Structure formats: structure tokens, C-alpha cells
Image: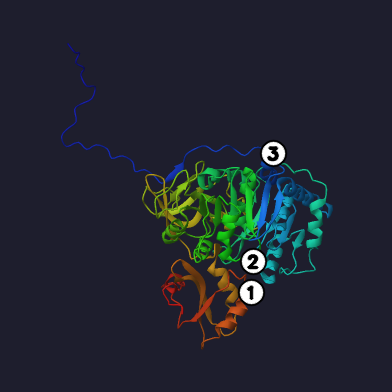
């Protein structure tokens, strides 16, 4: 016979309501990531794996009929010799070094050589004009400049070292690594700010440690991989994904030589047995214009720099029977959301936050929104990959934070499975071939062009998956477009300059007088 227990609480009344469960919030904080060891040096971390295989090819600069190969032993000696050379001309740990180099292997050697010595390199695009470089010099006051022939740079103010000099450093005796606090400044990169002023983004040595979360969270990278990156040496996407990450893993980096025709990329992928291909979506678009050879070694592609369309993803899969895995990030934190071979996301989504990240979708008050609701994509202030701040711009740095969260400026939503859907930008930032460009910066540079009363710029679609920067201006009469383009190139890097100009009767504005750039996107460009 069973024992009967009396309930310790009164029975529910018929009209009593059960409490509603709390909504699940848009926060991701799964998988602890080990703290960066100390003392630490970013270049030491990148080159450590290669010390185990000094005769293995670290880098191949490839052409259809030849390649220039660097073993891990050779590239390490050149980097540490460069560190010695920089010290020999008087640079010390903490000094700033401006890099005005072209698309050659000298770029990563100088970059890592400076970091090995504790010197702070500032890699810049060779497309920048002398006027733009002058602004960087005025802001950062570098102690020295490395300059390749033909790359724009003001002279006479700061010591400049040419190709013969910095290449001669490759054979010098190896410097010791400058070890220290992983939170100290390691390098500075420039990004366009929404204010119209390019921002100097300062990153710590620990930034490379944080990239370990990408290895499986995006790449699926192993030491046996041969990763071909289609970008130039002097692009930060190439420096990170194309060079430093494969070297950190002990893999082989493949970089097409300067001037490689996109039509040859398929041949290079096949001939050099690339197992992973990395590029901006625009490069995939160009590559698919040509017949592709069989690529039996290719496992998958990687895309970042701009939003990858589902149409382009499907076309690549049809042509190669491989997937493209997309990643989302920015100059201030690299990538932290991605689609990966080990965890494929649903079509139309950016992917999942990488394991070890702490991120959220937040509202204007800095609070996480319920799952499925739109908000601002944000990453926690303690993420090891997050910038130290904008150099010389503390107010701009503070403006990017809301409480504990760094604001990306992009809108998104998180579903119950942690996947993130991209819903556009909360400002008017443009994407020009994988570079984030501020319309305010371009407008400021072009507002004084002869004959123009007002100008606004935005990126516009000219055909499926193809966007260009276009300038819309008011004037007394139509101005010669070729003249406007030429004048723009005198003031702006080529990737920032409008590819089209169109005269309009008036710029669209809201009741407060603010230009509505989004309305310009619907104006047809002939």
C-alpha cells in the first residue's frame, strides 16, 4: 500500500496564471578562451610554429609559370634582420614607423620586423595620396618612414629609408624579440570614421592571440594547408588571413604576384595545390567570369570585407563544388562572427559567434534585446581582439562604447541557435571593394571642387552584386565627369574616389536638413 503525502502548497485555482518565462536575450558568451600569455610578442607568436620546420615553405609568391619561395628559416631571418636594421638607425621600442610600401614581400617582412623589435608599424595603402599621408604624419609623428619607389609620400620632414636600405637589413644578424606586456601597443591601422576623419586604430600585441578563435571558428586551418589569398601584401586582410594566420599555424601562404590577372587565379589555385582560397567577394565575382579548371585540392573558400550574396555563393558552389565560408568583422576587432566548415550556418545569415567570444545584440540603452529582435551588433570590451582605442582621439573612442559593449555600427538579429542575421548599417558607411569608406571623408575632400555647390556620396548598385562609390552634386550646370574623376584622384586613394558623378537639382534632406544618402541609392547611374 502506497503512502500518501499532503501537498505543502495550496492547490492551483482554476483562474490562476502560470508565470511567463523570461525572454531569451541576444547574448553569446560560450567557451572560455585562454588568456594571452605574458611576456608576449606578436611576431614571436606568429613565427614560433615555423621554428619546428625551418625548411618548409612559408610563402610562395606565385605566377602562372614560376614562384618565389621563402622557407620558414629564410623569412624568419629576414624579419629578425629587419628588426636589427631598424634598431641600427636609431628606432627604439614604442617608436612609430610609417610604412609606405608596395605590393611585395617586403611589406610583411618590415611589418613583423618592426613588431619583433617592439616598434609600432603603421601599414598603409600604397594608393593613398600625398595629401592623405601628410594627415597621417601630422597625427602620429612617426620617427621614420619606409618608402618604395613611386609610392606617394611627403619628403624632408622625417628620415625615409628606401628599398635598397630596408632590403639590405634582411641579411643582418637576428635581433632578439622584444617581449613584454601583451596589452601594449603593437601596430596601428587606419579606418574611415563616420565623422569624415580617418581613425588610427591602435591594437595590442594580444590581438594575434585572439585570432586563434578563427582557426576553427572560420578557417578550419591546419599546418598542412596551402592558403591562397588573392589580396595585395599591403592590405590588412591579406596580412592577417593570408600571411600571419597560416604562419601561426605552420601552414604555407600563397600570394599572387603583383599585377596578376584575375583570369589566372583559377589556374594558380589548381597549379599550386591550394587547399583554401581567401578573397573579398568582388574577387570571387571576377573569377567566375572565366572558365575554372578542376581544383581537386581545394576544400573551401573564405570571404570577408563586404557582404557575400547568396547568389555569388551558389554560383561558386556550382562551379567548384566547394563552399565559401563568410566572416564578419571590422578593423577595430577583426572577425568574430563566421560561417565555418565545422559549423555551417543557415543561408542568409552571417554565421555564428566564434567560440570564446562575448558579444550581443543591444538596444540604444546598451541592453541585450530579446532573441529575434533587431539591434546593434556589439562585442564586449574585454574581447582580447578588440582595439586599444583610436590613437589621439579619446572622445571618438568613448563614443564607440555603450556601457560594456563596443558598437560596430551594424544592425543584426540573433536567433535561438545563436546565428546572426545582418540587417544593414546604422550609419551611411560605404563598402568599396572590401574597404570601409566614410562618405563624410570623401565629401570633405571633394566639397571644394571647382563648380560644385554641394556634394553627397554613397555606394550604389550598378548590377547584381556590384556596387560603386558615386558622387551626387549640385551645380549651375553639368560638369565634365572625366575632369571630376581626375581631380578626385588627386585628393583621394583610388578605392575611395567616386567612379561616377551625377548632377542633381537638390540633395534629399530630412526636416532637420540632414542629407538622406539612402535616397540617392535609387537614382539611376548611366
Q: From the image, tell me which residue sits under label 3.
A: 52
Q: Quadrant of the N terminus?
A: top left
Residue depicted at x 77% and y 47%? 77
Instruction: Mark 3 or mark 1: name the one nearer the start of the chain.
Output: 3
Residue depicted at x 62% and y 39%? 36
Q: Quadrant of residue 268?
A: bottom right
299 to the left or right of 140: left
510 to the left or right of 6: right
Callout 3 environment at 10 Å: few (<14), some (14 to 19), or many (20+)? few
Q: From the image, tell me which residue sits under label 1.
A: 491
Instruction: Mark 2 or mark 3: name the one nearer the start of the chain.
Output: 3
Nearest the eye: 271 or 526: 271
Nearest the eye: 254 or 98: 254
Residue at disc 3, secondary structure: helix
Callout 1 environment at 10 Å: few (<14), some (14 to 19), or many (20+)? some
Gap in Å between the C-alphas at discs 2 and 1? 24 Å
Q: Quadrant of residue 213?
A: top right
Task: Decide if residue 402 is in sight here.
Answer: no
Residue at disc 1, secondary structure: helix
Residue depicted at x 54% and y 82%? 453
On the image, the x and y values in percent for residue 326 come to 49, 53
Nearest the eye: 446 or 392: 446
On the image, the x and y values in percent for residue 270 come to 57, 55
Residue depicted at x 51% and y 71%? 468
Gap in Å between the C-alphas at discs 3 and 1? 47 Å
Q: From the image, tell me which residue sits under label 2.
A: 259
The label nearer to you, 3 versus 1, is 3
Callout 2 environment at 10 Å: few (<14), some (14 to 19), or many (20+)? few
Gap in Å between the C-alphas at discs 2 and 3? 33 Å
The label nearer to you, 2 versus 1, is 2
On the image, the x and y values in percent for residue 178 come to 75, 44
Nearest the eye: 111 or 1: 111
Amino acid at each position: 500500500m502506497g503512502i500518501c503525502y499532503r501537498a505543502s502548497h495550496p492547490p492551483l485555482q482554476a483562474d490562476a496564471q502560470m508565470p511567463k518565462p523570461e525572454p531569451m536575450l541576444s547574448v553569446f558568451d560560450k567557451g572560455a578562451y585562454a588568456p594571452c600569455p605574458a611576456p608576449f610578442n606578436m611576431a614571436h607568436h606568429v613565427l614560433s610554429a615555423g621554428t619546428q620546420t625551418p625548411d618548409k615553405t612559408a610563402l610562395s609568391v606565385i605566377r602562372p609559370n614560376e614562384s618565389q619561395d621563402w622557407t620558414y628559416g629564410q623569412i624568419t631571418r629576414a624579419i629578425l634582420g629587419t628588426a636589427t636594421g631598424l634598431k641600427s638607425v636609431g628606432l627604439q621600442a614604442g617608436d612609430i614607423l610609417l610604412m609606405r610600401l608596395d605590393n611585395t614581400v617586403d611589406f610583411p617582412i618590415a611589418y613583423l620586423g618592426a613588431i619583433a623589435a617592439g616598434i609600432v608599424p603603421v601599414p598603409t595603402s600604397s594608393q593613398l595620396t600625398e595629401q592623405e599621408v601628410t594627415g597621417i604624419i601630422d597625427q602620429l609623428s612617426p620617427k621614420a618612414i619606409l618608402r618604395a619607389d613611386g609610392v606617394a609620400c611627403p619628403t624632408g620632414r622625417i628620415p625615409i629609408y628606401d628599398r635598397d636600405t630596408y632590403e639590405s637589413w634582411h641579411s643582418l644578424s637576428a635581433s632578439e624579440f622584444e617581449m613584454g606586456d601583451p596589452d601594449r601597443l603593437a601596430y596601428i591601422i587606419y579606418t574611415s570614421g563616420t565623422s569624415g576623419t580617418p581613425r588610427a586604430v591602435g591594437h595590442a600585441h594580444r590581438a594575434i592571440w585572439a585570432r586563434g578563435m578563427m582557426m576553427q571558428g572560420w578557417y578550419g586551418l591546419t599546418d598542412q594547408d596551402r592558403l591562397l589569398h588573392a589580396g595585395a601584401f599591403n592590405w590588412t586582410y591579406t596580412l592577417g588571413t593570408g600571411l600571419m594566420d597560416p604562419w601561426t599555424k605552420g601552414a604555407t601562404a600563397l600570394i599572387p604576384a603583383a599585377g596578376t590577372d584575375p583570369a589566372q587565379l583559377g589556374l594558380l589555385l589548381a597549379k599550386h595545390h591550394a587547399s583554401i582560397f581567401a578573397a573579398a567577394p568582388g574577387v570571387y565575382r571576377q573569377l567566375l567570369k572565366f572558365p575554372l579548371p578542376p581544383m581537386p585540392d581545394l576544400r573551401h573558400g573564405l570571404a570577408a570585407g563586404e557582404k557575400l550574396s547568396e547568389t555569388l555563393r551558389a554560383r561558386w558552389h556550382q562551379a567548384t563544388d566547394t563552399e565559401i565560408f563568410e566572416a564578419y568583422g571590422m578593423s577595430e576587432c577583426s572577425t568574430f562572427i563566421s560561417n565555418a566548415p565545422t559549423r555551417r550556418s543557415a543561408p542568409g545569415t552571417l554565421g555564428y559567434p566564434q567560440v570564446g567570444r562575448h558579444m550581443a545584440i543591444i538596444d540604444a540603452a546598451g541592453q541585450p534585446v530579446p532573441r529575434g529582435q533587431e539591434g546593434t551588433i556589439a562585442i564586449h570590451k574585454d574581447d582580447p581582439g578588440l582595439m586599444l582605442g583610436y590613437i589621439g582621439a579619446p572622445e571618438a573612442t568613448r563614443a564607440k562604447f555603450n556601457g560594456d559593449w563596443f558598437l560596430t555600427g551594424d544592425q543584426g538579429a540573433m536567433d535561438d541557435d545563436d546565428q546572426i542575421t545582418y540587417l544593414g548599417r546604422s550609419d551611411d558607411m560605404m563598402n568599396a571593394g572590401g574597404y570601409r569608406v566614410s562618405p563624410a571623408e570623401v565629401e570633405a575632400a571633394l566639397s571644394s571642387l571647382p563648380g560644385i555647390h554641394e556634394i553627397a556620396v554613397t555606394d550604389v548598385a550598378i548590377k547584381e552584386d556590384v556596387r560603386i562609390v558615386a558622387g551626387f552634386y549640385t551645380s549651375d550646370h553639368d560638369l565634365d565627369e572625366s575632369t571630376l574623376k581626375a581631380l578626385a584622384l588627386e585628393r583621394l586613394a583610388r578605392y575611395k574616389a567616386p567612379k561616377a558623378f551625377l548632377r542633381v537639382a537638390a540633395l534629399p534632406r530630412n526636416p532637420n536638413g540632414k542629407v538622406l544618402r539612402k535616397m540617392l541609392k535609387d537614382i539611376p547611374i548611366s
